[in-house]
Amino acid sequence: MSAPGGPGGRGAENRIPVLLYHAVMDEPPGWIAEFTVTPGAFAAQLDAIGACGRTAVTVGALVDHLAGRGPLPDRPVVLTFDDGFADLPGPTAEALAGHAMPATAYLTTGALTRSGGGSLLPPGPMMRLDQAPLLERYGMEVGGHTVTHAQLDTLPRAGLRAELVDSKAVLEDVLGHPVTHLAYPHGYNSARVRRAARDAGYESAVAVRHALSSRRDEPYRIARLILRRSHTVRDVERWMAGEGARVAPFPDSPPTVGWRWYRRARAAVRGPEFAG
């Protein structure tokens, strides 16, 4: 039996904060404001992460470790960014590079075209699809976040596959190499969705779960902690200490399962919709 905190243990050394950011800007649209941090708050959070002795790695590095393909630093942290807001290939990427912190960006391809009409996301300041290679030049890893940002666990088989495969193909065409990491929109997934992600050629997928990840987490529903505008540096410091949240892996709770069935029934009547 491993000692607490050792490999496979549940101590702080085994707990891996995977942070989920969206926009980093001063004046976000109302629909994403709750999940936006200001540039000043973001800089303070990056400073706190560095001061806590955590080493930033990409989701790819975490997944390699979960698969037994590579080591992790003693105290890793993973920073992820969903959707692809306009700040990402500019000041946000520059701030990360200035702190020597690699990250993973998950892009909703339908929201990044000139019209932005191929997405369920409400209107907002988004980066362009052709800026995806720029993220990589800043040291960021790029993953898929579907085409329309649909609730994947409510879609029929054909629609689910199209969301996964089409967005992957678009990103691979822009980047010129395979895209193997996925973020579920809203974090919503199920066993069926996880199988579909694997079958589509993704090596990993991140959920939300409002929990710390770990060296035993599940590659197709890696837990993340979502950053809200109300979170303080102290909240980030607690997560860096392996505190303040439960630790994955753990099974879905009955309320989570019930909410999934409710959303499926609603989608059968209304069709796909944004869940914000």
Image (spheres, helix red, strand yellow):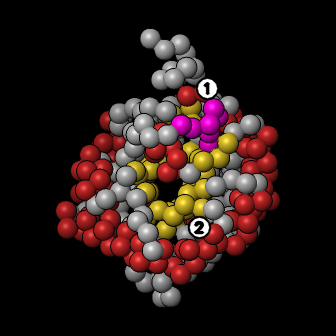
- The answer to whether 261 is drawn above or below residue 36 in the figure is above
Q: Is residue 36 left or right of residue 84?
A: right
Queried whether the magenta region covers residue 208, the answer comes back as no
Q: Which residue is mark 2?
A: 136
- The answer to whether 205 is drawn above or below residue 168 in the figure is above
Disc 1 secondary structure class: helix
The residue under the point 62% across, 37% down is 73
- The answer to whether 123 is drawn above or below residue 157 in the figure is below
Segment colored magenta: 71-77
Q: Quadrant of the N terminus?
A: top left
Relative depth, front residue between 93 and 42? 93
Residue 151 lies in quadrant: bottom left
> Where's residue 146, x and y in %?
39, 67
Label disc, if present, on residue 12 of the rendered structure = 1
Residue 118 lies in quadrant: bottom left
Disc 2 secondary structure class: helix
Q: Amino acid at mark 1?
A: Ala
